[in-house]
Amino acid sequence: MLQVLVVKLLITFLLTGAIGLVFAYKTSIQALATAYPRAGFLLFWLILRLIPFLLIYVAFGEKAHSDVGIFYDSAKGARAWGVVYRDFDSAYQPLFAYLTALPLFFWDSAEAILLEMILVEGIILWFTYRYYQAGQPNALFIALLYLLLPAPFVLVVLSGQEDIWMWGFGIWAMWQMRRKPDGLRLGLIVGLSLLVTKVVIVLLLPALFIFVRDRWRFVLGLVLIGVPALGLLYASGEMAFMSIIHQADAPRTPNLWSIANPFLSVYRGVGVPLLNGLGLLSTVLISVLVAVFSGRKDYAFGQFFPLLWCVTFAWFMCIQQSSLANYAFIFLMPLLFGVFSIQNRTALVLLLLFNAAIVIQPVLWWGMGMPVFSASDFVRVLPITEYVLELIIVGLLLYFIWNVLRARLSGISQRHG
């Protein structure tokens, strides 16, 4: 644990210092970016994603860690043309294993899947940058800021996390609704995302149904994807595909419940099933409120959707008792591009603190054996430190949610896109 902690602390320190430097030379960087936008983006990505991968996993021969090993086991089953959930286990939606199997045909190793995660994140960042480029002069600078943030760097380069794939479908939906607003196509995109990424995308469905105008075409799109998929899954393995739901049964950190439990014993007193239900219900209610107020303010889809996305998944991270720190990877990119102001220096400093806590807290929690704390544990330095990091993460999540809602839902001007 100590070695991993030192490495991640060093990465956090170096990247935070680099962010300070790019802000010091912001004018020069923006001038260069304006002159050579595509070359600038590619250069930033090569330096901050591909070259670190080549140094760590090719030059120094390190092996992929974290969930990449799980992805690799599932991908091998998919590469052998097995049927997901029946012939091999998968912790994710049915198509995920088959997509992560693709690089194994060229390089049979867990590192190939990690490289795929880096490439996919880069593609998603490119389309997000391109979406905001026309209306946001700082778009390329924001892309550089994202690449320099410690949490995304660690989550994708060192851990190979896939959560950013969810936003890939989100930005696809935004492009589609900008080019040709159509509930049917939106439903098809969201339905496809449910076959590839995490099932928590369903939390957005009631809010999207409320916000879009052609609601029943949206539902039709979901049905056209969902019904055949469910039929095939049931025919191949009956109810085996439901196994992924049970991952939410184990208490994890950080969230409001893990903070309250040492003093209120909520896991024992309330029970995990009820906590899960409260988390899901409250998340749906908050997302619906965002949709209702956004509709009243006459927000365009491109203004509404990032707001919905960030508030929904930030709150989900706070309230779901099985949430992990890496869930921040779901919303950090749209937070920066869609709802965050880099001119707000206080918010920027807090964002950097949030990133540092996201990087360090899991190292301590996993290193201690994923404990569920009681008050008696807070006589040692390590549990106290981990608990303080939980407080920082959840406190800053609530801060971001409050400030985003206050700033965005108080406005009345409509934006295009």
Image (spheres, rainbow, N blue to C red):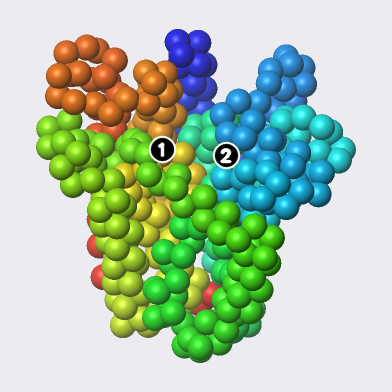
Seen in the picture, residue 16 relative to 152 is either above or below; the reply is above
Seen in the picture, residue 112 relative to 227 is either above or below; the reply is above
Pointer 1 local density, CA inside 10 Å: few below 14, some 14–19, many at least 20: many
The residue indicated by pointer 1 is: 325
Picture coordinates of residue 130 (x, y %)? 64, 60
Q: Residue furthest right?
A: 106
Q: Residue furthest left?
A: 264
Seen from the viewer's position, the closer of residues 270 and 61 is 270
Separation of residues labelled 2 and 1 (CA atoms): 11 Å
Which image quadrant is residue 90 in?
Answer: top right
Picture coordinates of residue 254 (x, y %)? 32, 37
In the rendered image, the quadrant that contains the C terminus is bottom right
Picture coordinates of residue 124 (x, y %)? 64, 53
Residue 297 visible? The answer is no
Pointer 2 local density, CA inside 10 Å: few below 14, some 14–19, many at least 20: many
Tag shown at residue 161: 2
